[in-house]
Image: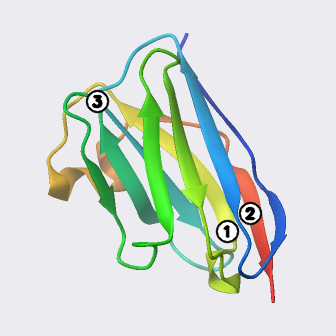
Amino acid sequence: QVQLVESGGGLVQAGGSLRLSCAASGRTFATMGWFRQAPGKEREFVAGVTRFVPTTYYADSVKGRFTISRDNAKNTVYLQMNSLKPEDTAVYSCAATTAALTVNQLTAAGSYVYWGQGTQVTVSS
C-alpha cells in the first residue's frame, strides 16, 4: 500500500523557517513534488524533484527561499522554507509518481498519482 505522510507544518512568524518532510512507503517514485492550496485559491505547484540525476524545479514565487531535496535511501522528500511570508500560508501537500516527468508535466497536479494528506503552514505578519 502506497502512503505519503507529511510532517513539519506549523505556525511561524514572517521571516522564519520551516522544514516539511514527506515520507513515502510502498513504492519508489521517479518524481516527487510539493503543492499548496490557500483558502479560496486553487492548488498551485511549489517545487518538484526527480530521482535520477536529481533535478529541482521551483515556482517563481518561492525561488531563492525554498529548497526541495530528497533522500532516496529513506524514500523521503523535504521542503526547506526560509524567509517565509504571510502569502505562503496554505495547506502543503506532497505528491509523487513513478513516471519521470518533464519540466512542464511536473508543475501540473494532474501528473501525479499519489498524494499525502497535507500539512498546514501558517505565517503570521
Q: Position of residue 109 (x, y in %)?
A: 38, 53
Question: Residue 90, which numbered label?
Answer: 1
Residue 114's label in the rendered image is none
The residue under label 3 is 51
Q: Earlier in the sequence, mark 1 or mark 3?
A: 3
Residue 91 occupies quadrant: bottom right
Amino acid carrying label 3: it is Arg
- Residue 16, image x and y in percent? 74, 72
Q: Quadrant of the C terminus?
A: bottom right
Tell me the distance, in whole angstroms, between the alpha carbons under discs 2 and 1.
Answer: 6 Å
Q: Residue at x 20, y 52 (%)?
A: 105
In this rendering, the answer to whether 5 lies above or below 109 is above
Against 75, is 32 above or below? below
In this view, the mark in front (1 or 3): 3
**Amino acid type shown at disc 1:** Ala
| Residue bearing mark 2 | 121
The answer to whether the residues at label 2 and label 1 have Cβ atoms under 8 Å apart is yes
Under circle 2, the secondary element is strand
Distance from disc 3 to disc 2, alpha carbons, whole Å, reads 26 Å
Give the residue drawn at x 41%, y 21%.
Answer: 72
Relative image position of residue 48 (x, y in whole percent) = 36, 50
Mark 2 or mark 1, which has the lower sequence index? 1
Check disc 2 and give the amino acid type. Val
Disc nearer the start of the sequence (3/2): 3
Tell which of 68 and 25 is nearer to you: 68
Does the image show residue 122? Answer: yes
